[in-house]
Image (cartoon, coloured by chain):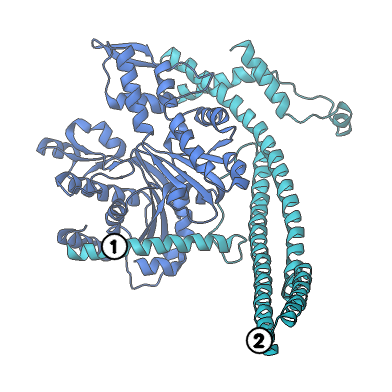
Amino acid sequence: MTRKLAHNVFQLMRGASRPLSLTRLRREGHQQVPVLRYTDLEVLISKAVDDTLTTLGLQLAESTVAGLSEEARLRFLGLVRERDQLRETVAALQRGQDELTVNRDSLRGELARATTELAEAQQAPATAATDKELMALIEALGHDLRAIFAGAAGSDRRLTDAALSAVEKALTGYRELLAQRARQEHEAKVVQLQRRITRLERKLLESEDLLARARLAARAGSPQLVDLSPALRPSDEDYAAKRELLDEIFRLNVELQRMVRPAAAES
Amino acid sequence: MPSSSSKKTTEEAREVREKSGSHDPSVEAGDEGILHIGIDLGTSRTAIAASNGVRESTFSLVGYPRDPVSRKLLGEGPLFGADVARHRLSLQVFRPLEAGVIKGSGEDNGKDSKENMKAARELVKHAISLSHPEKGQLIYAVIGCPAEASVKNRAAIIEAATEEVDSVMIASEPFTVAYGLNLLTDTLVIDIGAGTTDLCRMHGTMPEEADQVTLNYAGDSIDRLLAQLIRKHHPEVSFSDNMVTQAKEASANVGDNAPRCVVKWPVEGRPTEIDISKEMKEACLSIVPPIVKSLGKLVASFDPEFQALLRNNVLLGGGGSQIRGLGDAIAEYMDEHLGGGRVVTVEEPVYAGANGALKIARDMPREYWKQLS
């Protein structure tokens, strides 16, 4: 056993242990507490390996036994370290979740603004400023054209009206086109924001689940990532998403078996 | 594709099961009448997880007695897994899977492909028998196959299983791992098998072609390189491929504080201790750069907003993930070449694929199973 390893055990165990004050221990009625030296712990791990090998009747070379003891000690250190890493994971997940929440809230604000803009856009045929400018342009153009036609030799009133009407029609069409484009832009923006919100909300749910499991794992001191839950039920939060995946797997298998069966029938 | 004789075998098998009361398709079974099974049909190992709680694994080896003497000693039937390794000299040995698919199930339809198909069928049958189905239970199975397995490869797996189960579905292996662990979004799964390493990007929907990569840098390639390096540095030592694989499975470690890897192999007939630590580390680390390169491609083509999330959520599974320190080595290489990353190794590398396949089997609506039966 190396000094470095004993030091590692000491550091890691201290990091993984729960500090309790002497006052609290006394208050809880403890007069004496058992003390275990970290070096004893190492010796115990080593002895456990030796005993196990003896019990199993395995006659291994000394170097192999030494290797196994070393491996067991390293594994022990690894497990303690894993526990620390899990705590870090919990903290990182918590940070990630906070970021997702902030992101979701800001997106919700953005969505609310975009929805209002869309409603306004649907009520008004074009944005007010553009519309006002266009109306002024049509009016000015009409006025100028009337003046030009009135001053022209042999001007025909009907021809003037027809020309003015054509210009007005073209500008009105353009005005409607602009309004339609503005509406489409707003609608696309709203749809995009709604999609992002849905995605972020799903991520938030997942991160909450992951966080809960990581917290459980950190408490238990070992990773508990294997999900032993019962089969999927419609009441499950992720039912829709998983059902979609299962539907897709089924569809792909139906296609595959369609390809397999005719070939099987032929042979 | 099944021949008329294999059809006959199917009918015979069903007849035997019905006679023994083990199967009555006319009986509408409740959930208690169904055995869901998840199978990870791997190049090196086949793992099975069943809804009755049984979990077993076996080497993907099938052996048939070579001659009358062997038959007298070992019996008529095929042997599987460790028994094949033990009696390999008396057996005609088949490792029916290569790169995660049934050998020869691509284009070739020669004698070898037929023999491998037969061996694969026997292997699936054996794997299912390990789950101890009860009499009268319907068997619904999901089998994992490599991410980029061709339609023909997938069809061959279905064909191998059809005779033994009432309904079967195929799912991509890395997907089954992720489904089993409920990590369906923003996760990168690395499934290191013997024949292939499968990478899969999970983003909440079914992974498409662009989300998956299959590499040939896996357990077998490590073994090949390891043998090559040992031969180069210790030319006096005699060893077989099997000994190299055993040494890797017993002591592969790429950690900084890895214990020495010493084997006792013959030198001119005399068992001699040889230190192969350096060769072991070099061979095991050889798969890291191509894996990280492919990871980089999958990350780079993902939604930029979620790339960091993906990079920090890498899940390492498959038999290869049992190489101690490999997760850290991948994370380190990601740090150098992708600007960071976090790798978590699955808790049960041998069973993660089978567990996930079982979860899919249990979650799959019953009417879907009926339609495919």
Tell me the quarter of the picture where residue A79 sits.
Answer: top right
Which residue is tagged 1? A259
Q: Does residue B195 appear in the picture of this structure?
A: yes
Residue for point 53% across, 42% down: B299
Tell me the quarter of the picture where residue B34 sits.
Answer: bottom left
Frontmost residue, B345 versus B167: B345
Chain assigned blue: B
Q: Amino acid at mark 1?
A: Met
Relative to A92, say whether B126 is above or below. Answer: below
Q: Residues within 10 Å of mark 2 (few under 14, many from 20)?
A: few
Chain bearing mark 1 = A
Which residue is tagged 2? A159
Q: Amino acid at mark 2?
A: Leu
**Distance from the alpha carbon under mark 1 to that under mark 2:** 72 Å
Q: Is residue B182 left or right of residue A120?
A: left
Tell me the quarter of the picture where residue B216 sits.
Answer: top left
Q: Is residue B363 left or right of residue B66?
A: right
Asked if marks 1 and 2 fall on the same chain, the answer is yes
Residue for point 61% across, 18% down: A42
Q: Residues within 10 Å of mark 1 (few under 14, many from 20)?
A: some
Looking at the picture, how far across and down is residue B37, in whole percent? 41, 54
